[in-house]
Image: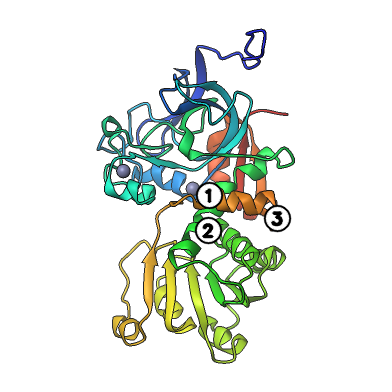
Amino acid sequence: MSRNGANEYPIPKTMKAWVLGNPEELALVEKPVPEPGAAEVLVRVDAIAVCATDIEIIKHGLPAMVDGGLPFNRGFTPGHEYMGTVVRLGPTVDEFQIGDRIAVEVHAGCGRCQRCREGMYTSCLNYGYREKGHRANGFSTDGGFAEYAINNINTMVHVPDDMSDEEATLIVTSGTAMYGLDVMGGIIAGEAIVITGPGPIGLMGVGVAKALAAQPLILTGTRQRRLEMGKRLGADEVVNVNIEDPVEAVQRITRGMGVQYVLECSGAPNALNEAARMVNRGGRICLAAFPADPVPVDLAYLVRNNIYVFGIRGEGKSATHRAAALMAQKRFDAKMIHTHTFPLAEVPTAIKYARERIEDAIKVVIKIREN
Ligand SMILES: [Zn+2]
Ligand SMILES: [Zn+2]
């Protein structure tokens, strides 16, 4: 509200939103604009990035879960990597103001289970149960392939004026990379890390790890163009695994010392076995991607060498806030991974570009509003 009581952001009764019918069926419909409750705001979605997980959800349902079941035919709106403008405040909200530009993290959690209390709200024990207060937009509650979305205030971070809408959609991806580094104990300047797989999380992992002064920072992958992008984001060395064995390359670069950390973002079947031979004794591996099928793992090697293996889901422990701070300080140029833009009406085309990597698409952004 402005001082004379007129809302600068008139809110219609209904909005355009994409909803999921059967698997692979998205339809653009008119839905009521939702009302924010206590500790919630209504966000006008200005831009949203397509994530590989959206594609999983649209095809298989999981990891989305609505009221304990698959998300099909429930009027559910997917999409979780969005940013926008706060246009209505729920009761008691004074942490944000109308007109604030914000980016979101996905998971509010339930706020009442052990994991949420520990800050591990992406692993909420009441995941998918809205009646217990759980929210994870685009997973268990309505997401951002729509003109408006409800967000809990604990899922929002301010976006600086000089950051574009498109770049702000990448904050949550950086947050996921930051969470992976957090669970391994956090990079200390001068520690060595390998990041395997130059997808969006891997590339943002390069930016975040370099901002935290990892050294050397080694990126491995198969696509030369993406490896070059990794170099521009801060990788000290890149290894094309089609040309050189990645384990040998890491040993060569580190003069046989190995690294302290591997952030695994490739999902390749042998990635964990290779990561185990990249870290030194007592090293740490975080899995941020996984292969589709079960794979054999050399467990004896992990145990004998006291290697720690972590898995992460999403962007817990306020990692998104820390990643957003690095981006606000321009410590790395996230914009580089944004390759394509489409309007809201073309969400299926945008998803096709992301899924099939048409024109080597990395991050495809839906720009809902021009500014
Ligand atoms: Zn995502
Ligand atoms: Zn919880």
Q: Which residue is mark 3?
A: 333
For image coordinates 50% across by 11% down, the residue present is: 13
Instruction: Give the alpha-carbon distance from disc 1 to disc 3, as whole Å.
Output: 16 Å
Amino acid of disc 1: Thr
> In the image, residue 240 lies at what x, y percent?
61, 76
Q: Is residue 91 left or right of residue 340?
A: left
Residue 131: quarter of image: top left
Q: Does the residue at mark 2 contact the one at mark 1 (Cβ under 8 Å)?
A: yes
Instruction: Give the alpha-carbon distance from disc 2 to disc 1, as whole Å.
Output: 7 Å
Amino acid of disc 3: Asp
Q: Which residue is mark 2?
A: 178
Q: How many marks?
A: 3
Q: Which residue is mark 1?
A: 320
Q: Nearer the viewer, residue 302 or 368?
A: 302
Amino acid of disc 2: Met
For image coordinates 47% across by 31% down, the residue present is: 151
Considering the image in quadrants, where does the N terminus appear? top right
Instruction: Give the alpha-carbon distance from disc 3 to disc 2, as whole Å.
Output: 15 Å
- Answer few, some or many: residues within 10 Å of disc 1's Cα (few below 14, many 20 plus, some between 14 and 19): many
> In the image, residue 346 lies at what x, y percent?
58, 33
For image coordinates 40% across by 63% down, the residue present is: 290
- Answer few, some or many: residues within 10 Å of disc 2's Cα (few below 14, many 20 plus, some between 14 and 19): many
- Answer few, some or many: residues within 10 Å of disc 3's Cα (few below 14, many 20 plus, some between 14 and 19): some
Q: Is residue 109 left or right of residue 190?
A: left
For image coordinates 55% across by 13% down, the residue present is: 12
The image shows residue 300, relative to residue 310, as above or below, that is below
Q: Earlier in the sequence, mark 1 or mark 3?
A: 1
Give the structural element (helix, strand or loop) at label 3. Answer: loop
Q: Nearer the viewer, residue 161 or 95?
A: 95
Q: Can the viewer see residue 47 in this picture?
A: no
Residue 235: quarter of image: bottom right
Q: Does the residue at mark 3 contact the one at mark 2 (Cβ under 8 Å)?
A: no
